[in-house]
Image (tube, rainbow, N blue to C red):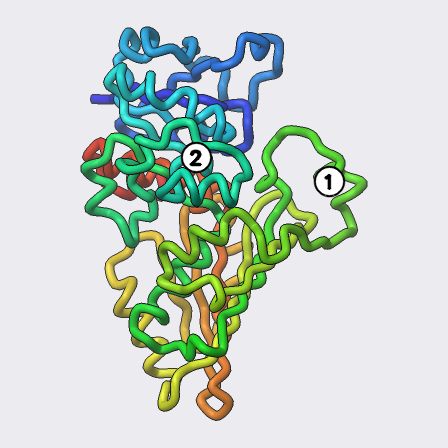
Amino acid sequence: MTTSVGIVGFRGYSGAELIRILERHSHAEPVLMEHRSDSAAESLPRGSKGHKRIPCTPEAVASANLSAVFLATPPEVSMDLTPGILEAGAKVIDLSGAFRLGTAETYKYWYKTEHTQADLLKEAAYGLPEFCRDRIRDARLVSNPGCYPTAANLAIKPLVSRELIDRSAGIVCDGKSGVSGAGRKPSMKTSFCEVTENFSAYSLLDHRHVPEVLMNSGLNADEFSFVAQLIPIDRGILETIYFRGVEGLTAEIVVNTYEDFYKGEPFVRFYDPGVVPDLRTVQHTNFCDIGVKYDPATRRGVVVSVIDNLGKGAAGQAVQNMNLILGYPEQEGLL
């Protein structure tokens, strides 16, 4: 048996990736949902033809008997659409930052605008299954994590939670992302001539994904420095994370910590000591690959964490969350 799930924002990169993944899902049938009156004339992404299309209204959600709806939309659109979808009886997996930060005050500080659905912030489950699986299963609203925080938190939290890091020395996270992370909407910053043969940093120290890392890793703001950088590729995120270990820490302890922390996790792969992943290992997948090297003599450590920003950083993780809230095998459609 299959269930119908809606995709709002299917013309964007993450929405198109959702279509691709759901087409190989054994239990879910994608339904494309139009949320703008001026979108009919826009070109459809590859893979979208042949799928049912309906308007994004509560009445249409109920009539189509949708079990869940993905919102691959800007935060303000997600805030506007979510209440009606929930009232119509469907669960929501939101890929924007609308419901990630817990309070309206925190959202306003980082997103520089008011939050219009503060009551829903209280019930939204943060959708990082490796840390929040139990809460996700029972949620009707799941806030899919940001791409940078997904790679960062999966790399950092094992070390912080086991108190292996000298927090007084701080942690530096150097994140590099492909251009699709900026979305499909044209801009000068992401145009071909600006990106090709170029390499640029942006949002130094005040990237809106920083609070997600702090909320989930256990770090304080003065212990974490993050810089995002744009590289001339279409997809993928590589983060190089620098830390100083506590006295007596050994490379063996570091390795054992990661292996124990992610034992049985289907989408986190940890490399042999001193071996680190590159982007090709995770592109077009839902995996997060992690490698680490630690030098006990100087107490310096480096973690390399890689994901596909459209996979584990967006659509792949969203389907992983859908599987949890609808009771399907967590790996369905993703391997």
How many numbered dots are placed on residues in this image?
2
Percent position (x, y) of residue 249?
37, 86
Amino acid type at circle 2 is: Ala
Is residue 166 visible to us here?
Answer: yes
Q: Do the numbered discs 1 and 2 sit on residues whose CB atoms are within 8 Å?
A: no
Percent position (x, y) of residue 143?
36, 38
Amino acid type at circle 1 is: Lys
The part of the image, by quadrant, that contains residue 124 is top left
Callout 1 secondary element: loop
Name which residue lies at 47% across and 62% down. Answer: 221
Callout 2 secondary element: loop
Separation of disc 1 and disc 2 at Cα? Answer: 23 Å
Q: Residue furthest bottom?
A: 297
Is residue 333 visible to us here?
Answer: no
Name which residue lies at 28% across and 21% down. Answer: 86
Name which residue lies at 49% across and 44% down. Answer: 284
Closer to the camera in the image, 63 or 18: 63
Question: Between disc 1 and disc 2, whose residue precedes?
Answer: 2
Q: Residues within 10 Å of mark 1 (few under 14, many from 20)?
A: few
Name which residue lies at 48% across and 47% down. Answer: 147
Percent position (x, y) of residue 157?
36, 64
Image quadrant in which the N terminus is located: top left
102 shown above or below 56: below
The part of the image, by quadrant, that contains residue 83 is top left
Left or right: residue 188 versus residue 274 is right
Q: Residues within 10 Å of mark 2 (few under 14, many from 20)?
A: many
Percent position (x, y) of residue 312?
43, 46
Residue behind mark 2: 98
Image quadrant in which the C terminus is located: top left
Q: Residue furthest right?
A: 193
Residue behind mark 1: 189
